[in-house]
Image (spheres, rainbow, N blue to C red):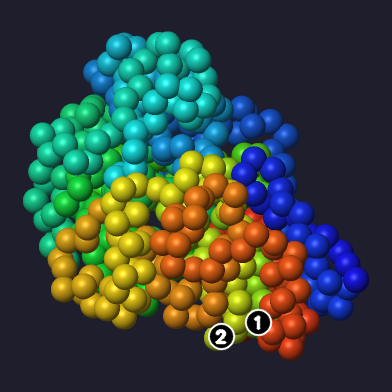
Amino acid sequence: MPGKTIHIAFGRGHLPVAVPEQAQVTVIRKPALPKLPDQAAAIRGALDAPVGARPLRALAAGKGSACILVCDITRPVPNRLFLRPMIEDMVASGIPLDRITVLVATGLHRPNEGEELAELIGDPWVLAEVKVVNHFARNDEDHIDLGTTPTRGTPVSIDRRFMEADLRIATGLVEPHFMAGWSGGRKVVAPGVAGHKTIRTFHSARFMEDPLAVQCNLVGNPLHEEQLQIVRMIGEVYALNTVLDEDRDLVHVTFGEIIESHLAAVEYIRGATAIPVGRRFKTVVTSSAGYPLDKTYYQTVKGMVTPLDILEPGGTLIIASQCSEGFGSAEFREAQERLVTLGPDRFLATLLAKSLAEIDEWQTEMQLKPMRRGHIQLYTTGLDDEEKRITGVETITDIDGAVAASIARHGDSAVAFIPEGPYVVPLHGVGGA
């Protein structure tokens, strides 16, 4: 008999999942974060009272040009709220509009253009008044070579439009990141506007297999440490960092020196995002956080990795992801085909021999982690039969039936639901629930 229905993020809405009457359901989500009474006032306050820096108007005074980094379409950053106030501050301080560039920090993702770019920027005035362009990591000539990082020797090249600007600002969303600990801040710079060799070094097996390169961890995380060294190599860089709640409303914003302002945002969200759970589960149901993160299967892998701490070894992880844009890049598709052909062990062996990862194969490497832990089932409406085959996981068409079957198979009625997917990090063995 049917029991209760749990709604999880899926596309631009939610997917209802009916659970059997006998199921013992634990829903894991962030606590309600206090809404900002006035989002515009909060942004104004952050720009006027920065962390570790002078107010934006003072920073812009005497500068001849500026470059503002924004995340690409895969991140739901509320650019519509802050880009115009930032640009107007710069103009008021003497920087001409035609000397201000908004640069989309694509990393090695595809560019955002046309209607998608308009959606990303969210403000027609910004698109009309300043130059808005994409970063292309594969174009070596578009970057300035800064040498190598002092600790691990990562080759560093950064988009020259950012490097040559007098005022450099990164903007982004602070959320758990399954390799770098937390997104936002320094991550928008590298890999955001780094050259392909920098990015491919970050994503090589020597970084990816490091046990400290995990979500919500910055201590000893090799990716985070390299990112800090890179922003220090660049010089003066500032950042505006946003935090969203489950409704995608802005609930916190910081501005200031890139490292200090990012850490301030991390401290605000850390306690609400890393959720203590007192046990592990043989059945875990999660999402890929809905639109825009579940546009592709490539991004869906993040939702598979984040809940692993509460998945019982040998358990079943069921993930729902619309994949409205399909599979992902041609390079990711090729990596997945190799995974299916070679098997997980042989595929990983090919990665360990490389100092530079092939483009997008690192997401396939991350998929090995949930595959080692348990059985993965994917509910999607956006992949064709061949794409489903090369996911390397079991695809399902009935998520309600899959939940019921997992309960029966494991002989355990306890089910964990994570409606917001990788934006919430459940942790076993910390506290109780």
Q: Residue at x 59, y 72 (%)?
A: 317
- Residues at circles 2 and 1 in contact by the CB criterion of under 8 Å: yes
Depicted 432 relative to depicted 290: above or below: below
Residue 238 spot, x, y in % from top left:
35, 39
Residue 432 relative to residue 361: left or right: right
Residue 22 spot, x, y in % from top left:
86, 78
Q: Residues within 10 Å of mark 1 (few under 14, many from 20)?
A: many
In the rendered image, which residue does mark 1 sit on?
A: 282
Q: Residue at x 22, y 29 (%)?
A: 161
Q: In the picture, which quadrant includes the C terminus?
A: bottom right
Residue 147 spot, x, y in % from top left:
9, 51
* Any part of residue 425 in sight: no
Q: Residues within 10 Å of mark 2 (few under 14, many from 20)?
A: some
Indicate the amino acid at tag 2.
Gly
Q: In the picture, which quadrant includes the N terminus?
A: bottom right
The answer to which of 387 and 378 lies nearer the viewer is: 387
Residue 202, image quadrant = bottom left
Residue 181 spot, x, y in % from top left:
43, 62
Depicted 276 relative to depicted 294: above or below: below
The answer to which of 173 and 347 lies nearer the viewer is: 347
Residue 426 relative to residue 351: left or right: right
Residue 8 relative to residue 322: left or right: right
Distance in Å between CA atoms under marks 2 and 1: 7 Å
Q: Residue at x 69, y 78 (%)?
A: 406
Indicate the amino acid at tag 1.
Lys
Mark 2, secondary structure of its residue: strand
- Residue 314 is labelled as 2
* Any part of residue 73 in sight: yes
Question: Which badge, 2 or 1, comes first in the chain's sequence?
Answer: 1
Q: Residue at x 56, y 27 (%)?
A: 81
Residue 69, image quadrant = top left
